[in-house]
Image (spheres, rainbow, N blue to C red):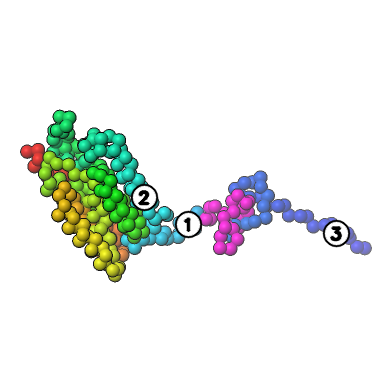
Amino acid sequence: MTEQQGAPASRPAPFCYRHPDRETYVACQRCGRPICPDCMRPASVGFQCPECVAEGAKTVRQPRTVAGGLVPRQVGLVTYVLIGLNVAAFLVELATGGVNGTFVQWGAMLPQSAIDPGSGQLLRGVADGAWWRPVTSAFLHANILHIAFNMYALYLFGPLLERWLGTVRFVAMYLTCAVGASLVVYVLSNPLSFALGASGAVFGLFGVALVMMHQRSYDVRTLLVLLAINGGITFLVPGISWQAHVGGLATGLVLGAAFAYAPRQSRGLVQWGTFAALWVLIVAGYVLQTMALSA
């Protein structure tokens, strides 16, 4: 006597572990849990779930620049933002009276308070609390030729240094060079005269680029010629702040050496230590000069 066997019971369809109401026949290649189309993340083989992708990302080393910073997602973005800020500031200058207008008088580097001969108004200098001037002066320009030259130089060297330094180091370098240049203006220039322009920061870029290009065995003759031409213009053409150029270049050379020659195993410590040391010197310089001018 034979027995009739019943049909085998079908297995229930699996459901996505993140969306229990969605039926699916795809499993994560890493953990094996079922995942729906919204949870599928392409992998080298098949798909993975979001949690496994996030866990795997923790173990992936982020690509680094030659100076140890994170590789920028969009090289040149910071440079273009800086150019945009300078152009915007120049348009505000034009709308407020130009180089003798209120905007320039508020933001240009002025070591000691002075009387505006046009309006008779007292213009507060850095020594009397106008602490913003060392930064704002780096975004102001005397005329169209002045801003055109500085922005062209920034356009040439900015993206290159962004690629080599990474975004954070590049921004820190630019601001440090700008404030370092203003310090030399503060100490060595006529305390009652205005100074303005991105030249100090741009010369800082020249300094960093020169050291890093030399360390990487690039041909630096073109850059040296550019520096020689600008140096000649700086000291031969009246009305140009040689103090800003010298201050920016010196700051850039120091930072360039830290970026280029710091030992790989401790380059973060060396580089940020150099930034810290420079800022201690810069702050001390401002404090001491302020005390001298206020005496």
Residue 222 found in image quarter = bottom left
Numbered disc 1: secondary structure: helix
Measure how far apart labels 1 and 3 are at the Cα level. Answer: 52 Å
Q: Disc 1 designates what residue?
A: 57
State the residue in front, 201 or 232.
232
Residue 260 visible in the displayed image? no
Labelled pair 3, 2 in contact (Cβ < 8 Å): no
Q: Categorize mark 3 by other alpha carbons within 10 Å: few (<14), some (14-19), many (20+).
A: few
Measure how far apart labels 3 and 2 are at the Cα level. Answer: 77 Å
State the residue in front, 173 or 11.
173
Q: Please identify the residue farthest to the right as the structure is shown.
A: 1
Q: Disc 3 designates what residue?
A: 5
Mark 3 or 2, nearer chain start? 3
Q: Disc 2 designates what residue?
A: 80
Labelled pair 1, 2 in contact (Cβ < 8 Å): no
Q: Nearer the viewer, mark 1 or mark 3?
A: 1
Q: Categorize mark 2 by other alpha carbons within 10 Å: few (<14), some (14-19), many (20+).
A: some
Numbered disc 3: secondary structure: loop
Q: Nearer the viewer, mark 1 or mark 2?
A: 2
Q: Bounds of the magenta span?
A: 32-53
Q: Is residue 74 above or below residue 288?
A: below
* Residue type for callout 3: Gln
Mark 1 or 2, nearer chain start? 1
Question: Is 73 on the left or on the right of 235, as rendered?
Answer: right
Q: Nearer the viewer, mark 3 or mark 2?
A: 2
* Residue type for callout 1: Ala
- Residue at x 36% of width, y 50% of height: 80
State the residue in front, 18 or 217.
217
* Residue type for callout 2: Tyr
